[in-house]
Image (tube, rainbow, N blue to C red):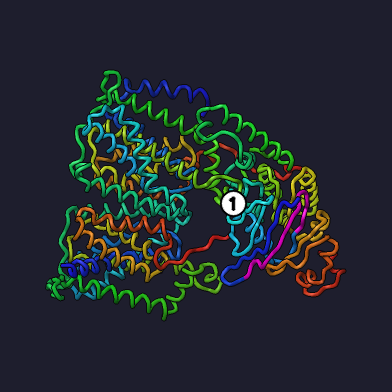
């Protein structure tokens, strides 16, 4: 994106609450919240070459952790952020740490197991989670006495989180970890042969994806102020996966764009009940059939002229 | 000084003897050729030396320290580097990035440091970048630094593989058929490159089908057949060794070897 | 009590085994996992329901009809949809999940509430020792055995079956010796859908049928296939039965709440300790 456009984005985003109707802002907040688990998942899908169907569950772990700490133990939400993230990372590493070294398909299978185990536990460990009743009356985030209990106010918090998460993710991808992950997803054997610590890199990617999911869950819990196991099942997992794949495997901007588009579509279609879900299934299926490398790559390919190494450019003896 | 000492290395796959009690010793500073017909175990030997396979029997020592049983990345850290016969490049990454990944080996810093700009990490990354660019220069790929690896023509891919190996600052470099698929001009270029690298102080073991290249470069040649070492000595002697001729040609005369 | 739990578990286990067979058949041939399998199972149940209500017929004919319809559906789906998803695992998985969502919600529109299934296997309760077993459960086991025998016969004694096995073992070589690989893949899909749909009819009378019954069964059948060996047919059957029995035991003696956990804990443990499953074979990686 040209520099001028990039510079204009942030002030524009800050002005939006004054310009947009409540309903649209509400959707925008969800979009901002969801960019966190989606970017987190992007560490695994785009950069490590792994598909995970557990991101929805991990998102739920973050949400439940903060919900329980704030409602049962009376913690202030701000204090609950770090535990929410840490617990999510701990759960992910504990159950998933051993499987991240497995081949791609086995890893997906394992994440399905993780998703189900977390879901069933959330629903049935009544003493801890109140099971099917869910956790209600989650307090709003309060900063310096200012309670973020309206969409307009929460928007700024969500925007802050989204911006920080984006910048942080960009820097991580540009770091040597980003190099290692891309290398091992291209050719794991070769990565090993150039002294990349493959397992360590994969576990780190898993931890990062969980951290982002946990932070997103934290935001979600304090916006919606009610959590229930059904919110964190296979559906959000699939949704996050699609959002992270649709925009082009390794493009953060693409993921954000896909999140915005798909979440808007979901909201717009919400009144249509089952038809919404059918439309959603069709989008998934059609997307995979016709744009397996993500929709944004279509635009990328047209914008950039193909870089083919010409024989003449090759070094001459 | 003995750099590599492999003793009685044996490996079987489902009853097939891929390597049978192979002894191999390489001194520091040597440039050794390894030849043998297809299926003789040359690549398998490299796979065992570099840790991809674990031998059933035998020991391998690098600078008098045992390396058999270690993971490939550990062996690389000790200075034993190999290239792959079927170029295993990081296709989606640029030429420079391919070498940079390797150049980061043993450099200071960490991902965390990179993200927050710690000085140790910045220094390490800068050193790695410099090393990577230097290696690209040595193989004549500097002009293609930002090209995606999968878009490279074959000869360039070959050179990239070598550049990446050099960036690991090897003590012992195993080159697995680096000339495969190259035309005569490119082979000459490769020959010159290998000589340059060798002259720079790297011990090299070269597996090649192109017997002429091997004899041109290497004073000492080792021949394998069906997993067994059948010859080990000065190159002119080895290529005239009757057992070697039998293995390659089934009993041809010494005249025919010069056409290899 | 114990024998009742075990036999009951055996019956559900057979269902997991049969649906799991669908996963295995597709995986062996394509090395991909079709996540719409559970939904095909559910659709088969509703198809059986509709036919049984509108066009009453002897049960074996009902099973055959549902099986045949699902077979044709499987052929069509492969040709129109699955064929375009073979790029890589991720695309195939997400695409098949999308298909599953379409199936679930299409049925949901027609049948928003759980519906009872006609007792096509009779409604007697059979006494085996101290256990009181619904007649349906016995029929489930019998039909599963028949199905396995039929499949075995198909794969061993018919040319088509042997062709399917050849493609599963090594598609390239099979193609080279004249097997129509693309047709074999289509037939495999047809078979996998047929068995899943038949399983749907088998279990129908035991519980109500509802649009979401495919989700859990599909996932557990998947766990069963992985546990037993996702490229092994006997392994999948074994895996299904073991999970069915174990989860019933856990449900009866530990807690009914966590019954569902059994399948997924087994899945994870399998993947960590022996990813190829009980009876599966490792596929070697070449350098």
Query: Is A213 in front, or is A33?
Result: A213
Q: Is residue B147 visible from the viewing direction of this image?
A: no
- Quadrant location, the C terminus of chain C: bottom right
**Residue B1 falls left or right of residue A249:** right
Name the spot of residue B147 as percent of width and height, x first: 64, 40
Name the spot of residue C21 as percent of width and height, x first: 35, 67
Name the spot of residue A38 as percent of width and height, x first: 39, 39
Q: Is residue C272 visible from the viewing direction of this image?
A: yes
**Residue A59 falls left or right of residue B126:** left
Query: Is B167 in front, or is A297?
Result: B167
Per the image, label 1 sits on a secondary structure element best described as helix
**Residue A200 falls left or right of residue A211:** right
Given the image, what chain letter belongs to the residue carrying mark 1? B
Query: Is B149 in front, or is C84?
Result: B149
> Residue at image x 52%, y 43%?
A181
> Residue at image x 34%, y 24%?
A156
Which residue is most to the right?
B255
Which secondary structure class fits the magenta region best? strand
Query: Is C114 in front, or is A145?
Result: A145
* Category of crowding for the residue at label 1, using alpha-carbon neighbours closer than 10 angstroms: few (below 14), some (14–19), many (at least 20): many
Q: Point out the stretch of residues depicted in magenta.
A: B17-33
Which residue is most to the bottom?
C157
Q: Kindly identify which residue carries mark 1.
A: B72
Determine if the magenta segment contains residue A76.
Answer: no
> Residue at image x 55%, y 37%?
A176
Question: Where is residue C22, by image quadrant?
Answer: bottom left
**Residue B163 falls left or right of residue C234:** right
Determine if the magenta segment contains residue B25.
Answer: yes
Name the spot of residue C236 as percent of width and height, x first: 36, 67
Question: Is C36 placed above or below A28 here?
Answer: below
């Amino acid at each position: 994106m040209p520099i001028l456009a990039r510079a204009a984005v942030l002030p524009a985003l800050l002005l939006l609450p004054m310009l947009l109707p409540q309903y649209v802002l509400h959707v925008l907040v969800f979009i901002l919240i969801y960019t966190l688990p989606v970017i987190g998942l992007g560490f695994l899908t785009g950069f490590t070459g792994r598909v995970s169907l557990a991101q929805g569950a991990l998102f739920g772990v973050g949400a439940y952790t903060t919900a329980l700490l704030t409602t049962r133990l009376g913690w202030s939400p701000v204090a609950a952020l770090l535990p929410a993230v840490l617990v999510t990372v701990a759960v992910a590493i504990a159950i998933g740490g051993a499987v991240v070294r497995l081949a791609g398909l086995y890893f997906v299978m394992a994440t399905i197991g993780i998703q189900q185990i977390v879901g069933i536990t959330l629903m049935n460990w009544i003493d801890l989670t109140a099971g099917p009743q869910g956790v209600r009356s989650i307090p709003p985030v309060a900063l310096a006495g200012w309670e973020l209990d309206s969409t307009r106010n929460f928007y700024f918090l969500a925007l802050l989180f989204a911006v920080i998460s984006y910048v942080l993710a960009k820097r991580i991808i540009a770091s040597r970890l980003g190099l290692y992950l891309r290398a091992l997803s291209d050719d794991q054997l070769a990565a090993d042969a150039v002294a990349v610590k493959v397992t360590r890199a994969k576990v780190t990617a898993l931890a990062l994806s969980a951290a982002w999911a946990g932070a997103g869950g934290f935001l979600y819990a304090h916006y919606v102020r009610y959590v229930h196991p059904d919110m964190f099942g296979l559906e959000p997992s699939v949704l996050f996966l699609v959002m992270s794949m649709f925009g082009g495997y390794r493009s953060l901007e693409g993921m954000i764009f896909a999140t915005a588009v798909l979440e808007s579509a979901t909201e717009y279609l919400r009144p249509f009940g089952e038809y919404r879900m059918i439309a959603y299934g069709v989008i998934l299926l059609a997307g995979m059939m016709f744009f397996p490398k993500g929709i944004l790559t279509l635009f990328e390919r047209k914008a950039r002229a193909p870089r083919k190494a010409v024989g003449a450019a090759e070094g001459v003896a | 000084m003995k750099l590599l000492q492999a003793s009685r290395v044996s490996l079987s796959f489902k009853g097939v003897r891929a390597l049978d009690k192979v002894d191999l010793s390489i001194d520091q500073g040597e440039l050794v050729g390894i030849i043998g017909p297809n299926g003789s175990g040359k690549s398998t030997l490299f796979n065992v030396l570099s840790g991809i396979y674990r031998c059933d029997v035998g020991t391998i020592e690098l600078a008098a320290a045992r390396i058999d049983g270690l993971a490939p990345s550990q062996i690389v850290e000790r200075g034993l580097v190999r290239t792959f016969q079927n170029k295993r490049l990081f296709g989606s990454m640029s030429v420079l990035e391919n070498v940079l990944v390797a150049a980061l080996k043993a450099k200071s810093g960490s991902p965390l440091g990179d993200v927050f700009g710690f000085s140790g990490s910045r220094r390490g990354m800068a050193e790695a970048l410099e090393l990577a660019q230097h290696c690209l220069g040595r193989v004549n790929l500097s002009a293609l630094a930002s090209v995606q690896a999968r878009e490279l023509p074959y000869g360039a891919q070959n050179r990239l593989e070598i550049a990446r190996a050099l960036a690991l600052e090897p003590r012992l470099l195993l080159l697995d058929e680096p000339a495969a698929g190259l035309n005569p001009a490119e082979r000459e270029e490769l020959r010159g490159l290998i000589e340059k690298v060798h002259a720079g102080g790297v011990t090299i073991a070269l597996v090649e089908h192109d017997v002429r290249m091997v004899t041109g470069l290497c004073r000492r040649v080792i021949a394998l057949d069906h997993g067994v070492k059948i010859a080990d000595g000065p190159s002119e002697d080895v290529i005239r060794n009757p057992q070697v001729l039998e293995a390659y040609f089934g009993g041809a005369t010494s005249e025919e070897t010069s056409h290899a | 009590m114990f024998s009742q739990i075990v036999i009951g578990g055996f019956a559900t286990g057979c269902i997991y085994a049969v649906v799991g067979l669908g996963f295995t058949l597709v995986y062996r041939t394509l090395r991909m996992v079709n996540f719409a399998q559970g939904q095909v199972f559910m659709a088969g149940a509703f198809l059986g329901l509709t036919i049984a209500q509108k066009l009453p017929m002897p049960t074996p004919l009902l099973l055959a009809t549902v099986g045949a319809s699902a077979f044709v559906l499987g052929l069509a789906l492969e040709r129109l949809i699955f064929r375009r998803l073979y790029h890589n695992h991720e695309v195939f998985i997400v695409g098949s999940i999308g298909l599953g969502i379409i199936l679930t919600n299409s049925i949901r529109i027609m049948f928003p509430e759980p519906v009872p299934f006609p007792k096509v296997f009779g409604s007697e309760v059979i006494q085996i020792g101290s256990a009181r077993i619904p007649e349906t459960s016995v029929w489930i086991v019998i039909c599963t055995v028949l199905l396995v025998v039929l499949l075995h016969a198909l794969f061993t004694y018919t040319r088509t079956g042997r062709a399917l096995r050849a493609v599963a073992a090594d598609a390239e070589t099979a193609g080279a010796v004249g097997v129509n690989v693309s047709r074999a893949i289509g037939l495999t899909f047809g078979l996998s859908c047929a068995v899943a749909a038949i399983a749907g009819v088998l279990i129908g009378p035991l519980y109500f049928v509802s649009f979401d019954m495919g989700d859990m069964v599909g996932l557990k059948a998947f766990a069963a296939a992985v546990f037993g060996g996702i490229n092994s047919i006997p392994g999948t059957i074994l895996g299904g039965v073991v999970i069915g029995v174990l989860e019933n035991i856990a449900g009866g003696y530990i807690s009914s709440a966590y019954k569902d956990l059994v399948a997924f804990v087994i899945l994870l443990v399998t993947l960590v300790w022996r990813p190829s499953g009980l009876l599966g074979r490792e596929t070697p990686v070449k350098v």
